[in-house]
């Protein structure tokens, strides 16, 4: 547990004094002011956002109406011009009516061209003004403009060329018939087909503009609905905030005292000094709660110190018991191992005598009976002669290894020796390394650990009196 210095405690107390909590009147005033402010802000935002969307929708609707009027203007004037052009064939024998009809044709053609130019300017102005047309409408308009943008000019020029080429003053039947045929042939001219396609394209554009008008009306409804939704949301939010602030104010006033009381009762009943009461205010109740936490924390530190001391005592007792057990196990292992180790020498001597006897027997009786020869081959006598020496040697090494481990365990436990004695540090390190030798081997998580022993020569010293006199005493 971290300790607080006196400076830190003083600084914390000073911060409490410099940050007093709000008064009850301020909390109640904020409880009224915040909901009213939210309601006012929500109303203002709703009106502003709704007006902005409505203005944009109205601009879009006006643009749609202008485009619709322009398209219908182009369409109607083109149809009127085409109607007057078709009437020219019947009027070739009446020059005055022909000229009047031709003048009407030119007037409607000019009006159609002007309406088409206004429509093109309208789309360019809409793009620069940030008015977003629908993709379908733009595709239809661009397609009509690209394919049939010059249809009116071509149509007027073709009719003008034909009118200038005919002689209306020649009233002979042959001339009238020829002139009528010229104007009738105009109806089969590709220019007329292009003009018809232009008119059909305008019809598609009218449909697209009408669809955009529907979207504009929906945008107006959306703006109105958005305004209502924002106003409703602001009112609901204000009500929620007002309810929350009322609850918060009551809890702010009553909860700290109740929490401190419940905390004290809980610590008293459970004896759990790790608990801490939440400091929720910076007023006097907050000071009291902080002091109570410090008191409980100090008690907890004292109890933790007591528990650590008790744990150390228990650990020492466990180590003592472990040392007794290790010493007992080492003693029980040491006796049979010494018995085995002592008999290995006699086993080697007896085995060597038997091998010498077998060699002597084979020297004097090189040709034994067939039954003995088969048994010698079955037991592999030559292999036994070579292997039995290594087997007895490995048994000697194993018993010596066990004796070293037993000695290390006895040195580790130190239960059979006096409490204070002279020890060899090299011997202690060697015993420890011998016990831990298995842990130095390579494992999946880490490679083999190699320990290099270069101790040097250490003089024996008195650990109870580590002075020059103590060293001289053992030198």
Image: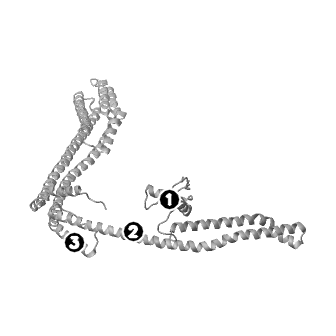
Q: Residue at x 17, y 51 (%)?
A: 45
In which quadrant of the rendered view does residue 280 lie?
bottom left
- Mark drawn on residue 312: 2
Can residue 274 be seen here?
no
Q: Secondary structure at mark 1?
A: helix
Of badges 2 and 1, the one in the foreground is 1
In which quadrant of the rendered view does residue 295 lie?
bottom left
Real-space Cα distance between discs 2 and 3? 31 Å
Q: Residues within 10 Å of mark 1 (few under 14, many from 20)?
A: few
Q: Secondary structure at mark 2?
A: helix
Looking at marks 2 and 1 on the same chain, the residue that comes earlier in the sequence is marked by 2
Looking at marks 2 and 3 on the same chain, the residue that comes earlier in the sequence is marked by 3
- Nearest the camera: 51 or 242? 242
- Nearest the camera: 79 or 59? 59
- Mark drawn on residue 440: none
Q: Residues within 10 Å of mark 3 (few under 14, many from 20)?
A: some
- Mark drawn on residue 474: 1
- Is 40 placed left or right of 415 in the picture? left
- Name the residue tied to disc 3: 264
- Nearest the camera: 195 or 302? 302
């Amino acid at each position: 547990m971290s300790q607080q210095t006196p400076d830190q405690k003083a600084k914390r107390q000073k911060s409490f004094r410099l940050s007093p909590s709000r008064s009850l009147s301020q909390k109640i005033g904020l409880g009224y002011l915040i909901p009213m402010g939210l309601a006012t802000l929500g109303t203002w935002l709703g009106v502003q956002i709704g007006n902005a969307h409505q203005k944009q929708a109205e601009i879009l609707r006006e643009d749609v109406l202008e485009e619709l009027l322009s398209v219908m203007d182009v369409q109607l004037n083109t149809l009127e011009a085409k109607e007057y052009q078709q009437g020219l064939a019947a009027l070739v024998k009446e020059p005055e009516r022909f000229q009047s009809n031709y003048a009407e044709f030119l007037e409607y053609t000019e009006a159609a061209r002007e309406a088409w130019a206004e429509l093109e300017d309208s789309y360019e102005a809409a793009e620069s003004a940030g008015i977003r047309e629908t993709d379908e409408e733009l595709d239809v308009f661009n397609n009509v403009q690209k394919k049939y943008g010059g249809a009116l000019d071509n149509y007027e020029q073709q009719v003008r060329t034909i009118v200038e080429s005919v002689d209306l003053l020649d009233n002979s039947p042959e001339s009238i018939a020829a002139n009528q045929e010229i104007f009738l042939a105009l109806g089969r001219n590709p220019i007329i087909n292009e003009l018809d396609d232009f008119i059909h394209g305008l019809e598609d554009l009218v449909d697209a503009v009408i669809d955009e008008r529907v979207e504009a009306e929906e945008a107006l409804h959306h703006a109105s609905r958005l305004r209502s939704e924002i106003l409703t949301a602001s009112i609901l939010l204000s009500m929620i905030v007002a309810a929350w602030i009322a609850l918060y104010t009551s809890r702010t006033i009553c909860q700290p005292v109740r929490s401190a009381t419940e905390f004290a009762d809980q610590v008293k009943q459970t004896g759990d000094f790790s608990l801490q009461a939440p400091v929720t205010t910076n007023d006097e109740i907050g000071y009291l709660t902080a002091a109570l936490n410090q008191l409980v924390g100090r008690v907890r530190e004292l109890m933790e110190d007591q528990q650590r001391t008790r744990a150390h005592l228990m650990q020492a007792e466990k180590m003592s018991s472990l040392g007794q057990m290790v010493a007992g196990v080492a003693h029980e292992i040491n006796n049979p191992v010494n018995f085995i180790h002592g008999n290995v020498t006699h086993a080697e001597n007896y085995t060597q005598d038997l091998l010498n006897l077998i060699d002597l027997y084979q020297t004097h009786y090189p040709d034994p009976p067939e039954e003995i020869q088969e048994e010698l081959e079955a037991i592999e006598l030559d292999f036994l002669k070579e292997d039995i020496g290594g087997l007895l040697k490995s048994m000697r090494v194993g018993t010596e290894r066990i004796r070293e481990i037993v000695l290390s365990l006895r040195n580790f436990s130190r239960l059979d020796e006096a409490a204070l004695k002279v020890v060899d540090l090299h011997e202690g390190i060697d015993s420890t390394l011998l016990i831990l030798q298995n842990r130095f081997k390579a494992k999946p998580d880490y490679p083999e650990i190699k320990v290099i022993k270069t101790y040097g020569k250490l003089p024996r010293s008195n650990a109870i009196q580590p002075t020059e006199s103590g060293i001289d005493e053992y030198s």
